Image (cartoon, grey):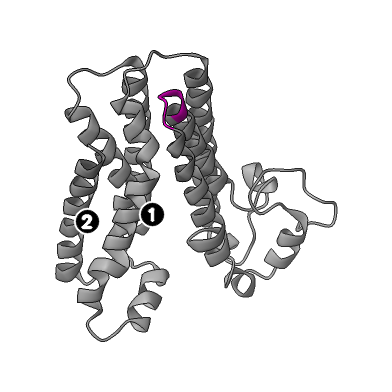
Amino acid sequence: MYLNCLISIGVFALIGWFFSVVTRHYSHVDSMWSLFMALAGLTTALNMPTLSMRAAIALGLVIVWAVRLSAFITWRNWGKEDYRYETIRQNNEPHFWLKSIYIVFGLQALLAWIVAYPVHASIASDRPIYWLDIVATLFVIIGLYWEIIADWQLHRFKANPANQYAVLNTGLWRYSRHPNYFGECLIWWGFALFGVASGSHWSWISPLLMTVLLLKVSGVSLLEQTITSRRPGYAAYIASTNAFVPGLPKSHGAE
C-alpha cells in the first residue's frame, strides 16, 4: 500500500509538471506539497476494508492541514512566480522545462512520500487507540493553530505598505523568527506519534526529515540568506529572537 501512495503522488506530480510546461510557472508545486501527503492518506484509506478510530482521526487531520495550507499558499502566490524557482530555472538552463520533472516535481514528490509515511502507517493499522493518540492529536492541533495564527499575522503585516522594509516582531513573531515553521514541525511530530502508536517506529524518520528541511534546506536557512539586506532591522531581530523554537526575546532586540 505504501508503494501505491508513491504511485498516486507521482501521477499528481506529473500532472503538475504538465501544467508547468503550459504556463512556464513552477510555484504551484508549493500548493501541491501538502496535497501530496493528503493523497497518500487517502490512497491508504481507499485500500483499507475499514478504518480504525486512529485512522479516521489521522486522515481527517491531514486533510484539514493539507487543504488549508494549499489554499493559503495558492492565494498568497496567485499571479506571481516565487523567486526561488526563478533562481533554479536560471541555474539549470537550457531545457529547464524538461529537467524540472525531476529537479522540482519529482524531488518534492519523493520527499512528500517519505514525510507522509506516519500518515500511511496510522491509517493502515488496526491497533486500538490509546493515550499516545491523544498526545499526537494535541500536537497536530496545537501545530495547526500556531501555523495558522503565524501565517495570518505575517499576511496582515505585509499587507500594510508602511511595513515594506520593517521587521515583524510582534505576536508569535516576537518569540520566534519562523513561528509558522515551528507549527509545521509540531504537526509532523504529532503524525509521527500517531505512527508510533500504530506500531511503526520508522515513523520518526518523517519529522526528523521535515525538521531538517525546515531548518537547513527550504525554510529558515534559505529565507534568511537575503532578508537582512532587504530589511535593515533584521540583523537586530536575529540577535534578539530565536530562529525556530519560541523563547523570550533578549533585551537588545529589534524595536
Q: Is residue 4 left or right of residue 214?
A: left
Point out the tag, 2 or 1, that comes first from the N-terminus. 2
- Contact flag, marks 2 and 1 (Cβ < 8 Å): no
Chain part drawn in magenta: 196-200
Q: Look at label 2 and name its amino acid.
A: Ala
Q: Establish if 153 lies above or below 214.
A: above
Q: Establish if 129 lies above or below 69.
A: above
Identified at 49% across, 39% down, the residue is 204
Q: Look at label 1 and name its amino acid.
A: Arg
Q: What mark, if any, has residue 76 been given in the picture?
A: 1
Identified at 68% across, 65% down, the residue is 234
Q: Is residue 22 magenta?
A: no
Pick whichever, 119 or 222, lies toward us. 119
Pick whichever, 246 or 172, lies toward us. 246
Q: Position of residue 208 (x, y in %)?
A: 52, 47
Q: Is residue 64 visible?
A: no
Q: Quadrant of the C terminus?
A: bottom right
Pick whichever, 69 or 140, lies toward us. 140
Count residues near mark 2 (Cα–Cα under 10 Å), then give few for <14, some for 14-19, many for 20+: many
Q: Is residue 145 visible?
A: yes
